[in-house]
Image (spheres, helix red, strand yellow):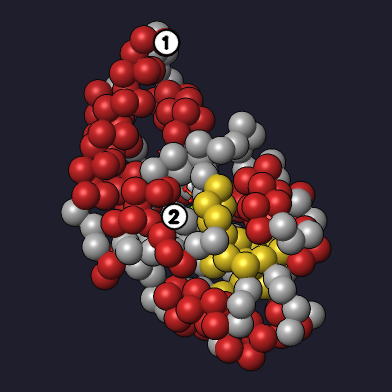
Amino acid sequence: MKKKAFLFDLDGVIVDTAKFHYLAWRNLAKEMNFNFTEEQNELFKGVSRVKSLEILLDLANYRATEEQKTRWLKQKNMEYLTFIDGMDEREILPDVVRVLDFLHSKDQGVALGSASKNARPILKKLDLLSKFHAIVDGNDVTAAKPDPEVFLKGGEALQIERSHCIVFEDSIAGIQAAKNAGMLSIGIGDTKTLGEADYVFRDFTEINTDFLINLIDK
Ligand code: B16
Ligand code: MG
């Protein structure tokens, strides 16, 4: 059995925090007199907080001062954190823990590769911190997905070469980041949206033990 690195995105892969990001951005959009839709929220997946605000300002056609942007970023995050505070283990997406535990039982490397600066408190809230040998998040990277930095750092932290790294991602930018890193990519979500990935599954319930063993032995 070979040692591989399995790199997990957070939002949309381990937990569905996109709905909380959406509610917080939507409330901010109201201050711009803009009706922010769930469809538009798709553009925010895997994108950093600062970049998300830039996109929202563009959509709303709103010119904000630097001071206002700083205030809004803080306000959005504070509201997001109140939603996170109400979360518990029941929010973990189906079969994520089964897959994490299986990889641990096979002595594989497991790391987080997320754009979020709130990744650690979220994993703590879900009691998942101990399932990761390394955490690379929005606080550790300078370049956002589709730049490969977050996954390259994950592989490095586990000391596993990139050709032996496997990425689970729900966003197009994240799949591109995995590809740019020279890693195998597994899309979690819609086949049409994530068509660029090497494999796509609706969720982890579709990923069976044989598939994981094949990935390890490849
Ligand atoms: P924060 P991921 C990303 O997480 C989210 O998909 C994206 O919507 C969010 O803007 C970004 O994290 C930054 O999050 O405001 O918590 O720093 O999918 O890369 O795990
Ligand atoms: Mg994601």
Element carrying mark 2: loop
Q: Is residue 47 left or right of residue 95?
A: right
What is the three-letter code of the residue carrying label 2?
Answer: Asp
Residue 61 rendering spot, x and y as whole percentages: 43, 20
CA gap between label 1 and label 2 equals 28 Å
Residue 113 picture location, percent across and down: 56, 52
Look at the image and tell me in which quarter the C terminus lies. Answer: bottom right
Disc number placed over residue 216 in the picture, else none: none
Q: Which residue is painted at 75% across and 78% down in the image? A: 2
* 201 is higher (above) or lower (below) than 122: below
The answer to whether residue 164 is above or below residue 68 is below
Looking at the rendered structure, which numbered label has been put on residue 66? Answer: 1
Of 7 and 130, the residue lying toward us: 130
Q: Going 38% across and 70% down the picture, which residue do you hit?
A: 93
Of the residues under marks 1 and 2, which one precedes in the sequence? 2
Asked which quadrant contains residue 25, the reply is top left
Observer-nearest residue: 203 or 212? 212
Q: Is residue 208 visible?
A: yes
Q: In the rendering, at what x and y percent does residue 96 appear?
A: 44, 73
Q: Residues within 10 Å of mark 1 (few under 14, many from 20)?
A: few
| Residue 11: image tag | 2
